[in-house]
Image (cartoon, grey):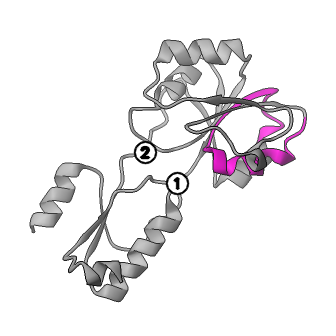
């Protein structure tokens, strides 16, 4: 309705790579309104020499793998996803999120830290050392703002459970603002 009511000619979906529901809703709305849609998604991080990544299909898969990989896990998955880690036993969970968790999102015994990137590699190394982190769990969000945790894990030789991105609905996809502007101009 909003697309039609506002005489929208095209939609560029530049939401977070893990905002699957918003992307699906946007795709469906554009199809229903007969409006072209483009998904702008920043490139994913790539496994570099020295990285020790264990791929996970989603947050539930990551939680299932965690207990066998470390005793002090740093979670960078977003506060709305931490409930999946309630199944993890014998591992201290250090959870960083942009906003503090609601009471319902808190896991007993977990350590909660708030913060918004960009972070420095040195700060991430110090944080991991302070918490005796031996495994990092991260969504493959791509981008520079939070990449320091990946570089710090590499430098410290930590295992990283890397959660793969959800699929993007069919349609045009680009990985840069310049490419999105070119699509819009075409």
> Does the segment drawn in magenta span residue 72?
yes
Query: Few, some or many C-alpha atoms within 10 Å of disc 2 (few <14, some 14-19, many ≥20)?
Result: some
- Tag 2 near tag 1, CB within 8 Å: yes
Q: Nearer the viewer, residue 44 or 35?
A: 35
Quarter-wise, where is residue 90 in the image?
Answer: top right
Q: Nearer the viewer, residue 167 or 14?
A: 14
Quarter-wise, where is residue 40 in the image?
Answer: bottom left
Q: Residue at x 50, y 12 (%)?
A: 122
Q: Residue at x 62, y 16 (%)?
A: 127
> Does the segment drawn in magenta span residue 43?
no
Q: Residue at x 33, y 73 (%)?
A: 171
Q: Earlier in the sequence, mark 2 or mark 1?
A: 2
Q: Is residue 72 visible?
A: yes
Give the SS element for disc 2: loop
Query: Few, some or many C-alpha atoms within 10 Å of disc 1 (few <14, some 14-19, many ≥20)?
Result: some
Q: Quadrant of the N terminus?
A: bottom left
Q: Tag on residue 165?
A: 1
Residue situated furthest left in the rendering? 185
Q: Residue at x 70, y 46 (%)?
A: 102
Give the SS element for disc 1: loop
Calculate the distance from the C-alpha at mark 2 to the C-alpha at mark 1. 8 Å
For residue 23, above or below residue 130:
below
Q: Position of residue 25 (x, y in %)?
A: 46, 74
For residue 7, above or below residue 157:
below
Q: Which residue is mark 2?
A: 44
Q: Which residues are magenta?
A: 66-89
Q: Quadrant of the C terminus?
A: bottom left
Q: Position of residue 103 (x, y in %)?
A: 76, 45
Quarter-wise, where is residue 68 in the image?
Answer: top right
């Amino acid at each position: 309705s909003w697309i039609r009511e506002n005489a929208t000619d095209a939609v560029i979906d530049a939401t977070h790579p893990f905002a699957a529901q918003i992307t699906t809703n946007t795709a469906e709305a554009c199809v229903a309104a007969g409006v072209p849609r483009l998904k702008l998604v920043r490139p994913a991080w790539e496994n570099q020499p020295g990285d020790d990544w264990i791929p996970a299909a989603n947050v539930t898969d990551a939680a299932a793998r965690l207990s066998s990989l470390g005793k002090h896990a740093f979670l960078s998955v977003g506060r709305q996803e931490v409930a999946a880690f309630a199944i993890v036993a014998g591992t201290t969970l250090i959870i960083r999120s942009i906003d503090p968790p609601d009471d319902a999102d808190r896991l007993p015994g977990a350590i909660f830290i708030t913060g918004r990137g960009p972070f420095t590699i040195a700060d991430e190394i110090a944080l991991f050392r302070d918490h005796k982190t031996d495994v990092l769990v991260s969504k493959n969000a791509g981008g520079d703002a939070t990449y320091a945790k990946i570089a710090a894990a590499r430098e410290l030789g930590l295992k990283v459970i890397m959660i793969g991105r959800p699929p993007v609905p069919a349609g045009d996809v680009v990985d840069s603002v310049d490419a999105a502007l070119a699509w819009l101009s075409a």
